[in-house]
Structures are given as C-alpha cells and as structure tokens.
Image (cartoon, rainbow, N blue to C red):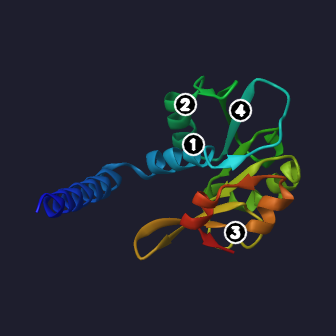
Amino acid sequence: MKHAKKIVLAVLVVLFALTTMKTFAQERPLHEVYSMMVFNFSKYVQWPDNGNGEFVIGVVGNEEIYKTLSTWYSGKPKGAKKFVIKSFKNAAEVQDCQILFIDKSKSGEFETANAKVKGKGTLVITDRNGLGAKGSCINFKTVDDKLKFELNQAAIETSNLKVSSALTSMAILI
C-alpha cells in the first residue's frame, strides 16, 4: 500500500511539473525561450579547445536575443572559461565564436556566416525552415505549435563538434 501511494505521489509531482513547465514556456517571450535554449545547448556539446579563457556566443540579427543572453549569461563560468556574448550586425562581422545564432531576419546571410566559421568548432544555430538541411548544426522549427529543433549530424561533424546522446535524443535528426 505504501508503495502505491509513493507511485501516485510521484505521478502527481511529474504532472504538476509538466503543467508548470508548459505554462512557464507559454508566458515567456520567444526571444527568452530561444536564449535559454541557445545557452543550454552549450551543456550538451563538446568543443575543441580554443586556447583562451572565453566561450563566445555570437548573435547575428536579433538584438532582443543578444540583450537577453548578455544580461543572463555574460561573465558566467563555463568550466575554466567565461561566457562572452557578442552581437554581429551581419555575416561580414562574424568572428570566432563557439556558438553562432543567426536570426531568421538574417537567414539570407546564412551561407556567408556559415562559411566563415566552417570547421572552426562553431555550433551554428538558425531559425528558418530549410537551413538545417543546408548545413546549420541546429535549426529551430515549429511542429504542432511546439518549438522543436533539428540537428544536422553531418554539419556537427564538419564543425569538429561532439554532441551528447541526450541532445540527439531530443532532436529531429537530419
């Protein structure tokens, strides 16, 4: 009997958590959700050592995501490194970074930005249908009114990155 009560309690806790998370996500502006996801991807990817004390997240084209990432994560530790958030107005400005988010408003510059970081250990994240298949490592996508993401395994390998199986299991693989 005690065991059954524990199971019922555990199920109720899980249901409450799922309901709360769904409400939490619905109340959050999209730029905050994207910012959290971009940051959390850093926990599931292994990068080659770049030899300096910075872990750089670059943002092309979305000032709200840049400001949110800067406010929430700039200066926080990532192992022996610290997070640095940089804003790039366009693909021509892109410099070395470990994560590069290209907003859908700048998706026309994807190929230029991707070429600048190709093979340099950069996780390229985009937000436009079709860019996952064109070589983005991760591409946000809405499926059944839910935000999901595609993971392009070939692009990950080309970028000299390793992705954990936990992240792979949550993704739409392409």
Q: Nearer the viewer, residue 26 or 46?
A: 46
Q: Residue at x 53, y 34 (%)?
A: 67
Question: Which residue is identified by label 3?
Answer: 132
Which of the 4 image quarters holds residue 93? top right
**How many tags in the picture?**
4
Residue flagged by tag 3: what amino acid is it?
Gly
Mark 1 or mark 4, earlier in chain: 1
Query: Circle 4 — which element?
Result: strand
Question: Which residue is identified by label 4?
Answer: 55
- Relative placement, left or right, of 169 versus 87 is left
* Disc 1/disc 4 C-alpha distance (Å): 11 Å
**C-beta proximity under 8 Å, tags 4 and 3:** no
Mark 3 or mark 2, earlier in chain: 2
State the image coordinates of residue 76 (x, y, percent, origin top left).
57, 25
Mark 4 or mark 2, earlier in chain: 4
Residue flagged by tag 4: what amino acid is it?
Phe
Question: Which residue is identified by label 1?
Answer: 39
* Disc 4/disc 3 C-alpha distance (Å): 23 Å
Q: Residue at x 22, y 54 (%)?
A: 13
State the image coordinates of residue 85 (x, y, percent, origin top left).
64, 32
Residue flagged by tag 1: what amino acid is it?
Phe
Which of the 4 image quarters holds residue 106? bottom right
Residue flagged by tag 2: what amino acid is it?
Tyr
The numbered dot on residue 73 is 2
